[in-house]
């Protein structure tokens, strides 16, 4: 494999090239986590926030970058932390499900899915540092119709949502 060459450096990202292919890398993390969580009464926990790159509000799983605040943090610890910070829910356990690239044509980033179990509410969530995250608790049986309604209203739905719902269906 050819070495990459940095062609642009921003505050938080690099634009690099390898064999003539340009791509983006984060400076402080190459892995993200997405937390697939369902309450005891059958509601999935989703987040919604404005995302500047797509200039729209986006529905997603609670998620975050591994090592962006603590370079020694592991993915499972990050999953627990992000679930609580973003949603106000704490979990007893996290289980690794799968890992893969987020958008391999443009970035080197991967995402690891974790299932959170043994949930209990400990706060209101909303994120940190001005993230302004809205938390949604949607009954699993209604989630498809709810997501379709949000899309009609102009909210984008991250494709990771559909992948994560697969794991909910498999566990029921």
Image (spheres, rainbow, N blue to C red):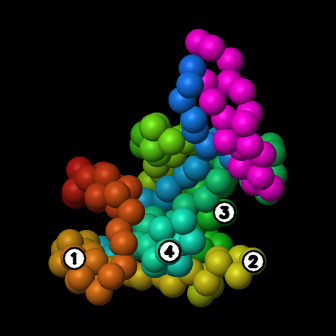
Say whether residue 52 is left or right of residue 148: right
The residue that mark 2 highlights is 129
Is residue 145 something that shows in the picture?
yes
Which quarter of the rendering shows the N terminus?
top right
Q: Name the residue under label 4.
A: 55
Lower sequence index among marks 2 and 1: 2
> Is 143 inside the magenta-drawn segment?
no
Q: How crowded is mark 2: few (under 14 residues within 10 Å), some or many (20 or more)?
A: few
Q: Name the element at disc 4.
A: loop
Precedes in sequence: disc 2 or disc 3: 3
Identify the magenta region.
1-18
Q: Mark 3 points at which residue?
A: 81
From the image, state whether disc 1 or disc 4 is nearer to you.
Answer: 4
Q: Main secondary structure of the magenta part?
A: strand
Q: Can you say which quadrant of the picture contains the C terminus? A: bottom left
- Local secondary structure at mark 2: loop
Q: Which of marks 4 and 2 is nearer the N terminus?
A: 4
Disc 1 target residue: 148
């Amino acid at each position: 494999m050819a070495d990459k060459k940095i062609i642009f450096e921003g505050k938080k990202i690099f634009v690099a090239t390898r064999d003539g292919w340009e791509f983006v890398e984060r400076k402080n993390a190459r892995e993200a986590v997405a937390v697939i969580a369902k309450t005891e009464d059958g509601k999935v926990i989703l987040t919604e926030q404005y995302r500047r790159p797509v200039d729209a509000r986006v529905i997603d799983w609670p998620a975050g970058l591994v090592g962006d605040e603590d370079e020694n943090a592991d993915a499972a610890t990050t999953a627990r932390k992000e679930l609580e910070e973003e949603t106000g829910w704490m979990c007893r356990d996290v289980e690794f499900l799968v890992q893969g690239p987020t958008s391999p044509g443009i970035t080197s980033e991967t995402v690891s899915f974790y299932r959170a179990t043994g949930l209990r509410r400990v706060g209101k969530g909303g994120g940190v540092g001005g993230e302004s995250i809205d938390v949604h608790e949607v009954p699993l049986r209604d989630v498809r119709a709810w997501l379709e309604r949000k899309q009609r209203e102009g909210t984008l739905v991250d494709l990771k949502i559909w992948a994560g719902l697969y794991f909910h269906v498999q566990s029921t």
